[in-house]
């Protein structure tokens, strides 16, 4: 997957910009099963425009689902951004190097990864 844009919703409008840093532009490897899932999902679209979102979910919807999932699991709800930190923790547990993790998540400096 190629990461080359940043998405925000500001004052009710979709805003697509370039990522914050040069390192934020990156290619991420995905497991084969996930590539297959994405291919199947994208085939459901008749066509997609250059500025069209393929995951039409809102921040409010994600918060609602996080609340629902946390309640069902009996755990404290975390912020959506904390999933990024959980992903990094998983990569550490799987034995990835700090450099590989920094490249994957787009950290400009490996020092950020170490923190």
Image (tube, grey):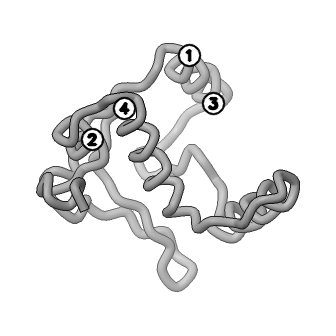
Secondary element under disc 2, as helix, strand or loop, is: helix
29 left or right of 111? right
Numbered label attached to residue 1: 4
> Can you identify the residue that label 1 sits on?
33
Marks 2 and 4, the one that precedes in the sequence: 4
Numbered label attached to residue 46: 3
For this rendering, which residue is in front, 28 or 93?
A: 93
Marks 2 and 3, the one that precedes in the sequence: 3
Marks 4 and 1, the one that precedes in the sequence: 4
Secondary element under disc 3, as helix, strand or loop, is: loop
Mark 4 and mark 2 in contact (Cβ < 8 Å)? Answer: no
What residue lies at 35% left-to-right and 59% top-to-bottom?
6
115 left or right of 64? left
Can you tell which of label 3 and label 1 is closer to the viewer? 1
For this rendering, which residue is in front, 86 or 48?
A: 86
Badge 1: few (under 14), some or many (20 or more) residues near its Cα, within 10 Å?
A: few
Numbered label attached to residue 101: 2
Secondary element under disc 4, as helix, strand or loop, is: loop
* Residue situated furthest bottom in the rendering: 11
Marks 3 and 1, the one that precedes in the sequence: 1
Numbered label attached to residue 84: none
What residue lies at 67% left-to-right and 27% top-to-bottom?
44
74 left or right of 98? right
- Alpha-carbon span between mark 2 and mark 3: 35 Å
């Amino acid at each position: 997957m190629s990461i080359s844009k940043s998405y925000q919703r500001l004052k009710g409008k979709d805003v697509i910009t370039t990522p914050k840093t040069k390192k934020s532009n990156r290619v991420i490897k995905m497991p084969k099963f996930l590539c297959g899932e994405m291919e199947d999902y994208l085939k459901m679209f008749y066509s997609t425009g250059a500025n069209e979102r393929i995951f039409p979910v809102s921040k409010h919807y994600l918060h609602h689902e996080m609340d629902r999932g946390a309640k069902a699991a009996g755990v404290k709800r975390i912020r959506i951004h904390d999933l990024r930190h959980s992903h990094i923790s998983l990569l550490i547990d799987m034995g990835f190097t700090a450099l590989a993790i920094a490249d994957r998540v787009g950290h400009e400096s490996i020092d950020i990864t170490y923190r």
